[in-house]
Image: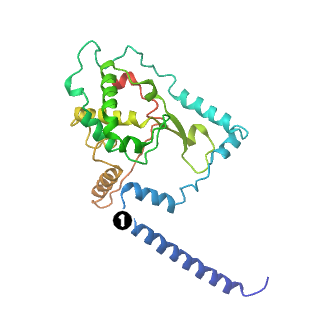
Amino acid sequence: MSGDLNQAKILRNKFNRAASKLKYNFYQTQIAAMHESGSHDWWKHMKTIMGLKTNGKSCMQGLANKTTDGDCGLLANTMNDFFVSVSDHLPRLNKSHKVFDVNEELPDQYMISVCTTFKALESVKANKTTGHDNIPAWVLRNYANVLAPPLTAIFNNSLREGVLPVEWKMANVIPLPKTSSPVSIEKDIRPISLTPIAAKVFESIIMKWVDETIEGEIDAKQFWGISGTSTTDVLVELVHMWYKATEKLNSYVRVVMLDFSKAFDLINHHLLLD
């Protein structure tokens, strides 16, 4: 190769500066367009911008190649065994463990009305993913007036007996990769359980009772699972706290973040009920 090396370096630097400026302007434009978005859409677009969103192709074949010699069927069984083993050491709830005494009359406040079930069915998102029963969300929503009475009867009977229908305890478990190229089942795969939507409707009604019961007992800094709060509230609270802490000269903030491994899978149900 021949030519002016110094001139080549100058042109290269100009090109890199121009490319950086264009990239900066592009991302600024993208972010500016997201200012009116909700937290869900904001994070969705951010994952796309940062390259965290996959192109839709399954990355499980790569994991199968690394762990089970390319056998996807064996990979599925291996995942299933691991997911079950996580909480296998915890004591199981036996059939005699009841929240209510089945010999006593269920309090009226815990009887579900047809109107309550109807409203809950009407609020189901039409595109919500179904469970193993394959009953689409739009069916429950569009025919809420027909389905509300029989479902209400099932809900109330379940409460009286203290037993949830076995079919509603079953789920399709979807292995969701935490990274675009997972290499370990134990560290890189998160199980997502898809239960029947009817069971989720029942849960939503129960959760309203739970919210009313624990209202005022939860720490003000608790945001997850509290009605009317979101990750946005957490971020606003943290940023406010950090700014307030750094108002004084030469002050600083240290942040320690803790993550409990398999936190929800390791909940002891006996302790939770107590």
Q: Is residue 214 left or right of residue 18?
A: left
**Residue 140 relative to residue 108: left or right:** right
Front residue (pair 215, 41): 41
Residue type at mark 1 is His
Splitting the image into 4 quarters, where does residue 113 fall? Answer: top left
Question: Residue 101, position in %: x, y?
Answer: 28, 15
| Above or below for 58 versus 264 | below
43 versus 186 height, above or below:
below
Does 203 appear above or below 31? above
Quarter of the figure with the N terminus? bottom right
- The residue pinned by badge 1 equals 35
Q: Nearer the viewer, residue 72 or 102?
A: 102
Of residue 252 and residue 273, the one placed in the foreground of this image is 273
Residue occupying the point 57% across, 55% down:
54
Q: Is residue 274 visible?
A: no
| Residue at image location 24% in from the left, 27% down from the top | 111
* Residue 45 image point, x, y percent: 46, 60
Residue at (65% x, 43% y) in the render: 63
| Mark 1 residue element | loop
Q: Is residue 158 left or right of residue 133?
A: left
Of the 4 image quadrants, the one containing the C terminus is top left
- Quadrant in the rendering for residue 146: top left
Q: Badge 1, how many Cα within 10 Å: few under 14, some, many 20+?
A: few
Relative height, residue 228 to residue 158 (above, below)? below
Q: Is residue 111 visible?
A: yes
